[in-house]
Image (cartoon, grey):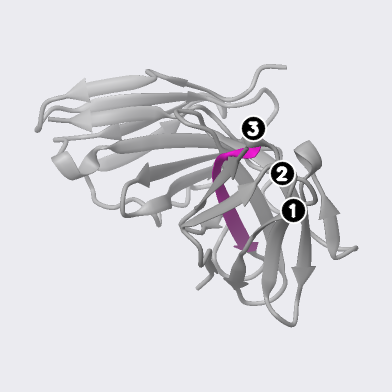
Amino acid sequence: AQSVAQPEDQVNVAEGNPLTVKCTYSVSGNPYLFWYVQYPNRGLQFLLKYITGDNLVKGSYGFEAEFNKSQTSFHLKKPSALVSDSALYFCAVRGLTGGGNKLTFGTGTQLKVEL
Amino acid sequence: GAGVSQSPSNKVTEKGKDVELRCDPISGHTALYWYRQSLGQGLEFLIYFQGNSAPDKSGLPSDRFSAERTGGSVSTLTIQRTQQEDSAVYLCASSFRTSQETQYFGPGTRLLVL
């Protein structure tokens, strides 16, 4: 079975400061990893994904994530946070074996960026 | 281009009634997924369609839930004899293929069962 853990329900950061939203995963074999963002009363918007290749993945709105196989992590980062980044962030994994074609999501991390 | 669309955006129903939720995937996407987002349960997979293959129904919570995809495009999720615990946001997603491709989500249907 595949699983995702987002250990922080909420992350608070001041605008202009770097932000990190943590994610660890468990799958059989190599993972496909995704980050999505959800604004209030909206669907999920794709931010970035790791399939293979460089461990540092760059995505939309200045976000990036680093795949760390030894730590089974895929933390989301941004060098300088904006108030408009405040939203609910989901990490998701799809395993290449088992788990089928579904995405398994973490429980989400609420990011709050304050002035 | 147009994204995934879902209708209705909101649905209020009485316990015991049947409801149908509709999803129009992105044109050309062969894979279609339904997920449910509810408080305390997070985002959970319900069902997946890929082309003409038999759907993966492994996430459906009970036999009151069913889904179909006509002509490889539009999908309908049906919940029979709704219960209050069915209240949630039902999200549809589509992708080109099933392996490396990104799933793109619709805005969801917010279902409230009274």
* Same chain shared by disc 2 and disc 1: yes
Q: Please provide the residue range marked out in magenta.
A: A84-94
* Same chain shared by disc 1 and disc 3: yes
Chain ID at mark 3: A
Q: Secondary structure at mark 2?
A: loop
Mark sitting on residue A18? 1
Quadrant, the C terminus of chain A: top right
Q: Earlier in the sequence, mark 2 or mark 1?
A: 1
- Is residue A80 one of those drawn in magenta? no
**From this viewpoint, is residue B24 visible?**
yes
Q: Residues within 10 Å of mark 2 (few under 14, many from 20)?
A: many
Chain ID at mark 1: A
Could you tell me the amino acid type at mark 1? Pro
Q: Horizontal placement of B58 versus B5: left or right?
A: left
Q: Quadrant of residue B81?
A: top left
Q: Pointers 2 and 3 in contact (CB under 8 A)?
A: no
Q: Secondary structure at mark 3?
A: helix
Residue linked to disc 3: A84
Could you tell me the amino acid type at mark 3? Ser
Q: Quadrant of residue B4?
A: top right
Q: Pointers 2 and 1 in contact (CB under 8 A)?
A: yes
Chain ID at mark 2: A
